[in-house]
Amino acid sequence: MRKIIIIGLSILLVLGSILMAKYFIANKQKPKSKHNKIVKTVFTKEVQNSTIPLVITTNGNLVAKNKIEIYSEVQGVLKTNHKEFKSGTRYSKGETILKINSDEFYANLQAQKSNLFNSLTAVMPDIRLDFPEEYKKWQNFVSNFDITKTIAELPKTNSSKEKFFISGRGIFTSYYNVKNLEVKYGKYSLKAPFNGILTEAIVNPGTLVRPGQKLGEFINPSVYEIAVSVKSEYRDLLKIGKQVSLVNLEKTKSWAGKVIRINGKVDSSTQTIKAFIQVNGNDLKEGQYLEIDLEAKAEDNSFIVSRNLLVDNNKLYIIKDSKLDLITVNTVFENMNTIVVKGIPNGTQILAKPVPGAHKGMLVKVYNETK
């Protein structure tokens, strides 16, 4: 009997424990979860639409407007000149840049002049007999003939008979042979066509120079051109004579230039058109890289924003009730780092800097610089 009572009490104790556990579990109060709201601080700027000049920013390298590549048209040994034929040497207009030894050629030229003079003296008696009225002009030509100077122009023939007579004696052939040699003799020395500087010198004095060989490069260092590529959609905005601004890469110097030529052909691969800008300046150098600001036109009721603020090419984040919101804008002009947009009401607060992880409805707090 005692054993049965113990077993019964044990069963009641187990059942009571189970019921008590279920009761406590059912009435247990769960702690409320706490959510920390993250509010990011953002930089903003207020939109004030205005008339904005559209400026096309492009770049290019300077090329001297007056530039010649020096080639030899004759053969000979390069002679030493009063100035060294080296890169960086400056020459004034008309000053001799280089000389090629021409002793052998000069001797041949003098021989041809002597032959012409002999031919003329041989026909003088016949001219005096057959063309007495023309004798004086030929006598003056022969009297003034100087073998050491450039030959003068032959007297003009006044009749067909005189012309045939002179031609039959080989005077015309000898004369033009001499003139041809004189022209070629002038190519043994090269004079500067303008004030400039030698930017490239390939040969040294004593070097044998051959016809067609490149010797160097000569430029005028005061006037330059720069070719820039502009989108074909802006070709109607380009005009010859239009003023442009040029700056160096460091943004420490600027120059004023003007459009002097516009190519009439659009590059099929890039859909751009080339404009050529002339710029003057003593501190400019051949090959220097410059950036060009070309003012195209003015756009009313527009605003400039940074290119990296644009979302999906046509949307911007604005601040509305301390939250981020997206609005659609009309992009009217794109530059290297900025874009000109329309369609934002005046007074709208937009992001001034990109916000990592930004999304529509995100809570934000505007940074107050004064505070």
Image (cartoon, rainbow, N blue to C red):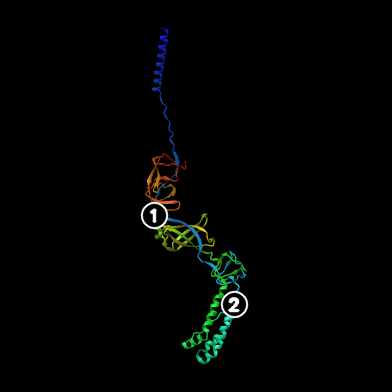
Front position in the image: 228 or 343: 228
Q: Amino acid at mark 2?
A: Tyr
- Can you give x and y, in whole percent of width and height, for residue 61 in the image? 50, 59
Quarter of the image where the N terminus is located: top left
Q: Residue at point 41% right, 16% down?
A: 14
Element marked by disc 1: strand
On the image, the x and y values in percent for residue 19 come to 39, 18
Give x and y (percent) for residue 298.
40, 56
Mark 1 residue crowding within 10 angstroms, few (<14) / some (14–19) / many (20+)? some
| The label number, if any, that marks residue 299 in the structure image | 1
The residues bearing labels 2 and 1 have C-alpha atoms spaced at a distance of: 70 Å
Give the percent coordinates (x, y) of residue 37. Answer: 43, 35
Crowding at label 2, few (<14), some or many (≥20) Cα neighbours within 10 Å? some
Up/down of 312 relative to 170, above or below? above
Task: Identify which amino acid the numbered label 1 is placed on.
Answer: Glu
Determine which quarter of the picture holds residue 265. Answer: bottom left
Spot the residue most to the bottom: 129
Residue at the top extreme, as displayed:
1
Find numbered disc 2 in the image and state the secondary structure of the residue it sits on: helix
Precedes in sequence: disc 2 or disc 1: 2
Residue that numbered label 2 is attached to: 106
Residue 159 in view (yes/no): no
